[in-house]
Amino acid sequence: MNEPVLALDDVTTAFTSGWGPHHSVIAAMRNVTFAVHAGETLGLVGESGSGKSTTASVALGLRSPTSGHVRFLGKPFGDRKDRIGLLQAVPQNPLWSLNPRLRVGLSIAEPLAALDRSSLASHQAAVEAMLDKVRLDRALAQRFPHELSGGQRQRVTIARALITKPRFLVFDEAVSALDVSVQAQILNLITDLQVEHGFAALFISHDLAAVRYIAHRIAVMRRGQIVELAETSRFYARPQHEYSRQLLEAL
Ligand SMILES: Nc1ncnc2c1ncn2[C@@H]1O[C@H](COP(=O)(O)OP(=O)(O)OP(=O)(O)O)[C@@H](O)[C@H]1O
């Protein structure tokens, strides 16, 4: 098989809280191993506090693990400036990533401008092309985030994440705040854009229905460990781990 876009090998990430004799250590990730290939979406599910967000920050190169190895495009993470724009995140709430005082067209241009220190206004053509791709009217570029619907705002966030042509994307509860019908539209959009761009994706969600819809494989996390990792169809038909069965029964 081709070299994965992103691979975690035996990664452990521990947090220490408190100090002196009263300090405690929490292993948010324990011996986590997985790989994501170009054009593939790995779903990451698990209850609150199981370590999904910590895994996302390690995979994005935002946090160094305590032990183990992370490889992006076959190499350990190097200088942060060498990977600007190559790894991007789409968070749950677009209002967290969009500047409320910036017209959305300029927000979409921001990551490109950060790459080459150009002006936001110089990227109008690229912004319009991205608006077409996420199926938003070009006229919306002139609006502010609060003037859009939740689904439109999430399309803007996706346009902003994709404008630098990243190789790896994390969707962190990216559709959880949306109505079910809007969720389906956004999931379809992500799938279409992945076919076109070939990015690898980690799709974090507590919503097993959304994950089933979009992920090629599923990893189940519990107390920092991946307890099951399987092809989506096999996972939903015959979950192997007791905890996976509990999650599916709750669904
Ligand atoms: N910066 C930190 N300092 C100390 N402990 C942390 C820190 N970040 C996370 N943790 C702990 O690590 C564990 C995993 O947290 P994490 O946020 O990765 O889980 P999660 O699965 O993403 O949860 P949620 O679905 O609620 O976002 C939790 O016990 C959490 O309290």
Image: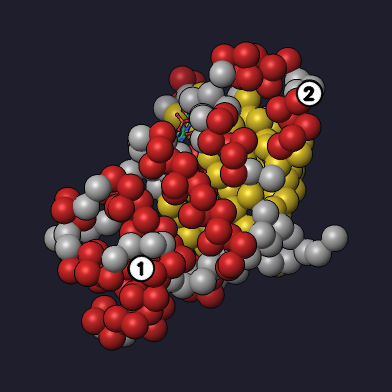
Q: Percent position (x, y) of residue 18?
A: 42, 27
Q: Which of marks 2 and 1 is nearer the N terminus?
A: 1
Examine the rendered structure and indicate whether residue 250 appears above or below residue 19. above
Q: In this view, does 172 lie to the left or right of 113?
A: right
Q: Does the residue labelled 1 lie within 8 Å of ligand 1?
A: no
Examine the rendered structure and indicate whether residue 133 appears above or below residue 34. below
Q: Percent position (x, y) of residue 14?
A: 57, 36
Taking the spot 29% from the left edge, 66% from the top edge, the residue there is 137
Amino acid type, label 2: Arg
- Residue 55, picture quadrant: top right
Examine the rendered structure and indicate whether residue 43 appears above or below residue 104. above
- Residue 176, picture quadrant: top left
Q: How far apart are marks 2 and 1 (CA)?
A: 40 Å
Q: How crowded is mark 2: few (under 14 residues within 10 Å), some or many (20 or more)?
A: few
Name the residue beneath numbered marker 2.
238
Q: Percent position (x, y) of residue 156?
A: 33, 59
Q: Is residue 233 left or right of residue 190?
A: right
Taking the spot 61% from the left edge, 24% from the top edge, the residue there is 223
